[in-house]
Each structure stands twice: as structure tokens, then as C-alpha cells.
Image: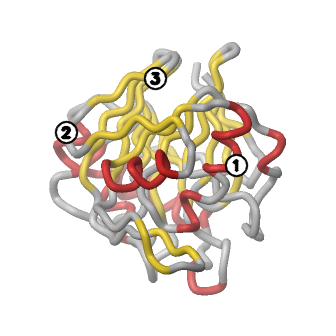
């Protein structure tokens, strides 16, 4: 199973011919390592409705026929845009080609802005994804919260967590989150895209190893982590 960071909170999961995009904010993303037209996934997973996470979802899904998985309100909006949407809510597990995604809580906000105004108001989420024989937690945008300990009980191989601060938890709270999540490996995201979320990922990696005992793979945009 391969996980590629595309920049910001966008990721690509690959296992054989199965491809899954997560939060594909590529167009307009100064940290993006690829363009939207390079991808034809079977599935797109979304943590919440903010524009820097939904990104190119509608264009990619309509072109490729991908199914999108999201929370309810966001899924209804995507469906109205002609996207094949499968939507649930916290606690629900949704199946997709090659795996499953369990929708879990996150503490943040969630809305999608269009020229006509804000649509798809709803709740943010994290996703516990089982794919390619691995369990990967995509925290989405969130602060630290105590129920991450329950998410850790899912048996996480990889935890993908934000460290940017300002809009999400920063490095110090992300280390505390790893103590609750107990993954085998952590991958930081949602940092260095814009000036307010500039962080030193290598410093975070050292602190995570020292204080939480968790190995951090601090990828560059476009780099791939292979889970054996």
C-alpha cells in the first residue's frame, strides 16, 4: 500500500490498480505536487467541506466516475453537482472499492463557499480508512481532543495529522494527539501551504519520537510512503 502526499491535506492511496484520493485540493494550492487532470481514482474521501479540502473533487469525480465519500450535508451538495456521492455520518462505516472508511469526529468547522454564497454547512470529520491491509487515520482539520484515545483503539498503522496551528492543532498538541492515537507511523500535513501555518516538520518529528515514541515520516509534497 502506497501513500503519497500531494501537498496541504491532499493524499493519494494506491494498492494495485485501486486508487483513492483524499481531500484533493490541487488547483490553487501553492504546495500541490500534481494537477487534478493527472488523477482518475475510483474513490474520493473528504473530511469536511472547506474549499481547501473539497478542492477539485467535482471535476475529478465527474470526469473519472469516482464515488465520493463524505458526511451527509457535503454529500448532498456534491450529489446536486452531478457527482456519485455516498454519504454518512459519525460512527458509520462506508464501503468503497478496495476498502472502507469509518467516519469519526473532528473539532473544526465545515462549509463550502461558492460565488452564490456558503453551501453544505455541516460537521467536520476524521476518517479511519482500511485499505491495502492497513488502517490509516486521516484526522482532517481538528484540534486535540480526548476521544482520540478511542480512535487509537482502532489499531492504527498510520496517523495523518495536521500540525500547522492557527486553524488546527499545532506541533505541541499534535505530539499529545500521538500519545492517544498510538500509531506505528505518523505523517504530518496541513502545514507550510500558506504563511499562517508555517512549521518545521523535522522538529515535530524529533519531538514526536522523544515524547510520544512515534516515528514520523515528514514527506515532501509528491513523496510516497510505502507501508509494508
* Distance CA(mark 2)–CA(mark 1): 28 Å
Who is closer to the viewer here, 17 or 154? 17
Mark in front: 2 vs 1? 1
Q: Is mark 1 on a helix, strand or loop?
A: helix
Vertical placement of residue 108 versus 98, above or below: below
Determine the residue positioned at 54% across, 60% down. 53
Determine the residue positioned at 34% across, 68% down. 121
Tell me where residue 171 sits by quadrant. bottom left
- Mark drawn on residue 199: none
Picture quarter with the N terminus = top right
* Distance CA(mark 2)–CA(mark 3): 16 Å
* Distance CA(mark 3)–CA(mark 1): 19 Å
Where residue 37 sits: x, y (%)? Answer: 82, 44
Where residue 50 sits: x, y (%)? Answer: 48, 67
Picture quarter with the C terminus = top right
Q: For the residue carrying disc 3, how many other residues have a C-alpha within 10 Å: few (<14), some (14-19), or many (20+)?
A: some
Q: Mark 2 points at which residue?
A: 91
Marks 2 and 1 in Cβ contact (< 8 Å): no
Where residue 39 sits: x, y (%)? Answer: 76, 37
Where residue 96 sits: x, y (%)? Answer: 46, 23
Q: Mark 1 points at which residue?
A: 59
Q: Mark 3 points at which residue?
A: 96
Tell me where residue 225 sits by quadrant. top right
Determine the residue positioned at 69% across, 43% down. 60
| Residue 104 in the figure: left or right of residue 81 | left
Residue situated furthest bottom in the rendering = 196
Who is closer to the viewer here, 116 or 136? 116
| Residue 81 in the figure: left or right of residue 87 | right
Amino acid at each position: 500500500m502506497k501513500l503519497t502526499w500531494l501537498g496541504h491535506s491532499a493524499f493519494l492511496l494506491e494498492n494495485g490498480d485501486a486508487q483513492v484520493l483524499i481531500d484533493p485540493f490541487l488547483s490553487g494550492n501553492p504546495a500541490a505536487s500534481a494537477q487534478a487532470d493527472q488523477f482518475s481514482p475510483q474513490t474520493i474521501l473528504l473530511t469536511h467541506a472547506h474549499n481547501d479540502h473539497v478542492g477539485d473533487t467535482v471535476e475529478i469525480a465527474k470526469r473519472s466516475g469516482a464515488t465520493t465519500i463524505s458526511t451527509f450535508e457535503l454529500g448532498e451538495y456534491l450529489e446536486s453537482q452531478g457527482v456519485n456521492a455516498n454519504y454518512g455520518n459519525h460512527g458509520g462505516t462506508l464501503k468503497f472499492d478496495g476498502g472502507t472508511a469509518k467516519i469519526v469526529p473532528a473539532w473544526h468547522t465545515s462549509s463550502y463557499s461558492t460565488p452564490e454564497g456558503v453551501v453544505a454547512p455541516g460537521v467536520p470529520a476524521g476518517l479511519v480508512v482500511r485499505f491495502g491491509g492497513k488502517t490509516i487515520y486521516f484526522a482532517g482539520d481538528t484540534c486535540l481532543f480526548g476521544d482520540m484515545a478511542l480512535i487509537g483503539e482502532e489499531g492504527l498503522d498510520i496517523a495523518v495529522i495536521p500540525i500547522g496551528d492557527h486553524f488546527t492543532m499545532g506541533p505541541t498538541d499534535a505530539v499529545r494527539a500521538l500519545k492517544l492515537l498510538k500509531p506505528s507511523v505518523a505523517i504530518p500535513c496541513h502545514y507550510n501551504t500558506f504563511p499562517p501555518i508555517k512549521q518545521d516538520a523535522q522538529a515535530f518529528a524529533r519531538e514526536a519520537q522523544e515524547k510520544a515514541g512515534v516515528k514520523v515520516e515528514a514527506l515532501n509534497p509528491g513523496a510516497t510512503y510505502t507501508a509494508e
